[in-house]
Amino acid sequence: MQNIHAHTWDQALHMEPATIREAELSRGYPFDLTVRFDAFMADMAPFSRVAVFGMKARRTGYWVPDRYVADFVARAPEKLVGFAACDPTQPGYLEELREGIETFGLVGVKMGPMYAGFDPRDPRCDPVYRYCEERGLPILFHSGTTYNRMAPLAFTRPWLFDEVAMRYPELRMVLAHVGHPFCEECLVVIRKHPHVYADISALYYRPWQFYTMLIAAQEYQVARKLLFGTDYPFTTAQDSIDGLRRANDVTGQSGLPRVTNDTIAELLARDAFALLGLK
Ligand SMILES: [Zn+2]
């Protein structure tokens, strides 16, 4: 099994106090987001490979340096694969990205358009997309909503990535969280574009939405483009795996359509790293 979506960061170093408070508000109780290496590795035991990234989004108070992510993944290089982060609204973003890839050895990019406050079609993104397309670096975009008040919903709709994919047809992209709650919109984007995928991280705990998304993915015949991810530390590996295996529980005795055993087994077995061109 592989996990295409996990975070590393230290909330005391990499998040603004207001950002930490918002996380607590969303849960209703204090929640320590800091990722500790040993606990992380214990949680990741089910996976052979894990993609790990932080986040750069000045607007909403996240800034995890690429060196921090590189140092983290260097402690378990046989399993952890580090992605750089990029906020194209900030000065020097391209030089910083180059350093993350070429100096620190990171092999993919994480971007959060709504967190950083940019439209994915913004011309400031073009040099990033060109660079990643030329070098075969996948970009994992946050897509779908969040609890951060100042993160504009306008910049997170999955359809925005349709235009990016038409302009950069060889760019490998992952739309995180299947663009929740705009899941069907996300599915029709990944259906059109051979190199655009979606990850199912952090969806299982809204069981009805998760179930209907998986059914729609089957109906559009795009379940093969869904990648498994956890969004650790927001969720754990085991809860995420169990949540997928129990996707049909919400249907009870209703006679509603089933998420097939094949859909579930193939999702858990999929070689996402190969699909994204990561060795
Ligand atoms: Zn995430």
Image (tube, rainbow, N blue to C red):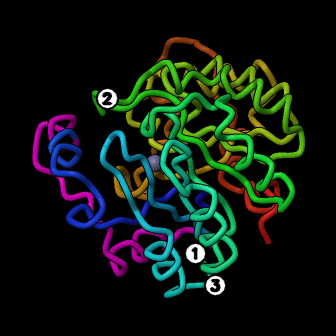
* Residue at the (82%, 54%) spot, across then down: 275
As shown in the figure, which amino acid type bears the numbered disc 2?
A: Met
- Relative placement, left or right, of 42 versus 278 is left
* Amino acid marked by disc 3: Glu
Does 27 sit left or right of 38 as displayed?
A: left
Name the spot of residue 253 as percent of width and height, x first: 48, 17
Magenta range: 23-48
Q: Which residue lies furthest to the front in this view?
A: 91
Tell me which numbered mark, 2 or 1, is placed earlier along the sequence: 1
Name the foreground residue: 204 vs 14.
Answer: 14
**Whether label 2 touches label 1, CB < 8 Å:** no
Position of residue 57 measured from the top left corner of the image (x, y, whole percent): 42, 46
Quarter location, residue 213: top right
Residue at the left extreme of this rendering: 29
Q: Specify whether residue 35 is painted magenta.
A: yes
Residue labelled 1 has its Cβ within 8 Å of some atom of ligand 1: no
Measure the alpha-carbon separation of dots 3 and 1. Answer: 6 Å
Residue 78 shows which numbered tag? 3
Placement of 25 over or under 152, stated as above or below: below
Res 277 label: none
Q: Residue 192, relative to residue 274: is it above or below? A: above
Q: Can residue 33 be seen in this view?
A: yes
Residue at 15% across, 36% down: 25
| Crowd around label 3: few <14 · some 14–19 · many ≥20 (10 Å) | few
| Tag 1 residue | 80
SS category of the residue bearing label 3: loop
